[in-house]
Amino acid sequence: MRIISIIYKLLVLSLFATTSLIAADAVDFNANAVTKALYRGVTFHFVDAIPTITSSAGQGYTGQAIYCAFQSTGEGLLAVCGPDDAGLKIRWNADTGTPGDHASGLFLFKHKDFLNGLNSGPVALMDGHETVIIRFGYMNPGKLGPNQPVAVASLRLVIKDDRGYHISKDYPVESGGELTLKATKQVYFKYDPVTPSMNEAGTRGEASVPSFRNVEFLGFRVDTVRGSQTTAGSNVGVVEFSVGAARMN
């Protein structure tokens, strides 16, 4: 019996080691991968088969393909820029927009482009392999408020698993700040990324419970409202975004 027990323990340890080897960052965006800015000033919808920006399209980008959507009630822009210009972002130029204008940008990364071999099999988010790290770019003038260029800004995580799309509760954006989250510990809502609402890229529904298995998309959505200081431009963006995950056995 002792020999059987030892063999069993060795098998468990071996399985744990194997699992550890296939857990890594599925997404690892850094704005340093952008050498040429891309701006989109027209509302467009999410298409899960067509990326908005890729490294193969000669757009000055060397990272994972990004699938986007953009909804704006005014003169906001969706943009992909370098680290000094706030990365994946919503932009208002100086002397554009009206106080209260909304802009919403969706940025998603697809399973087929996941890193570290995680694109070669089903992927899950699970305890210990689910950490999300987000770093925000500088937002002129470094603060938010109704009398500032940007009145309100928030970020929500977005995932698609075998139960569909889900979007998390919102987190406030802090100029130059950083968030570290556990993906499986968030409050989520059903999400339709294709059909926009008036002020949002996509539509939120009732509360949902993701399975976190067979993950197909990982990313985030940025939502902003223009403040009264429209003579100044401002960015609301993410310069680093990484998500840990594990390949399912």
Image (tube, helix red, strand yellow):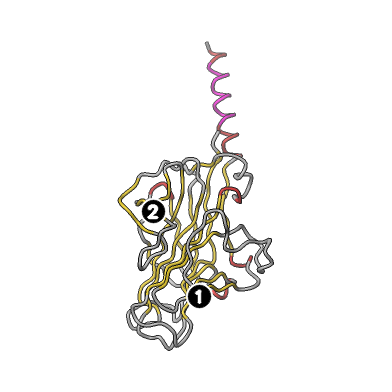
Identified at 65% across, 68% down, the residue is 59
- Provide residue 55's location: percent of width, then percent of height: 66, 61
Circle count: 2
- Provide residue 201's location: percent of width, then percent of height: 42, 63
**Neighbour tally class for label 2: few under 14, some 14-19, many 20 plus, Cα within 10 Å:** many
Type of amino acid at the residue the image marks with label 1: Gly
Identified at 51% across, 62% down, the residue is 68
Circle 2: element type: strand
- Provide residue 14's location: percent of width, then percent of height: 59, 29
Circle 1: element type: loop
Identified at 40% across, 54% down, the residue is 192
- On screen, residue 49 versus residue 125, left or right, reads right
The residue furthest left is 206
**Neighbour tally class for label 1: few under 14, some 14-19, many 20 plus, Cα within 10 Å:** some
Residue situated in front as seen by the camera: 55 or 184: 55
Over which residues does the magenta segment extend? 5-15
Q: Quadrant of the C terminus?
A: top right
Separation of marks 1 and 2 at Cα, in angstroms: 24 Å
Mark 2 lies on residue: 191
The residue furthest top is 1
Q: Is residue 95 above or below residue 7?
A: below
User: Residue 14 magenta-drawn?
Assistant: yes
Residue situated in front as seen by the camera: 69 or 240: 69
Type of amino acid at the residue the image marks with label 2: Tyr
Mark 1 lies on residue: 41
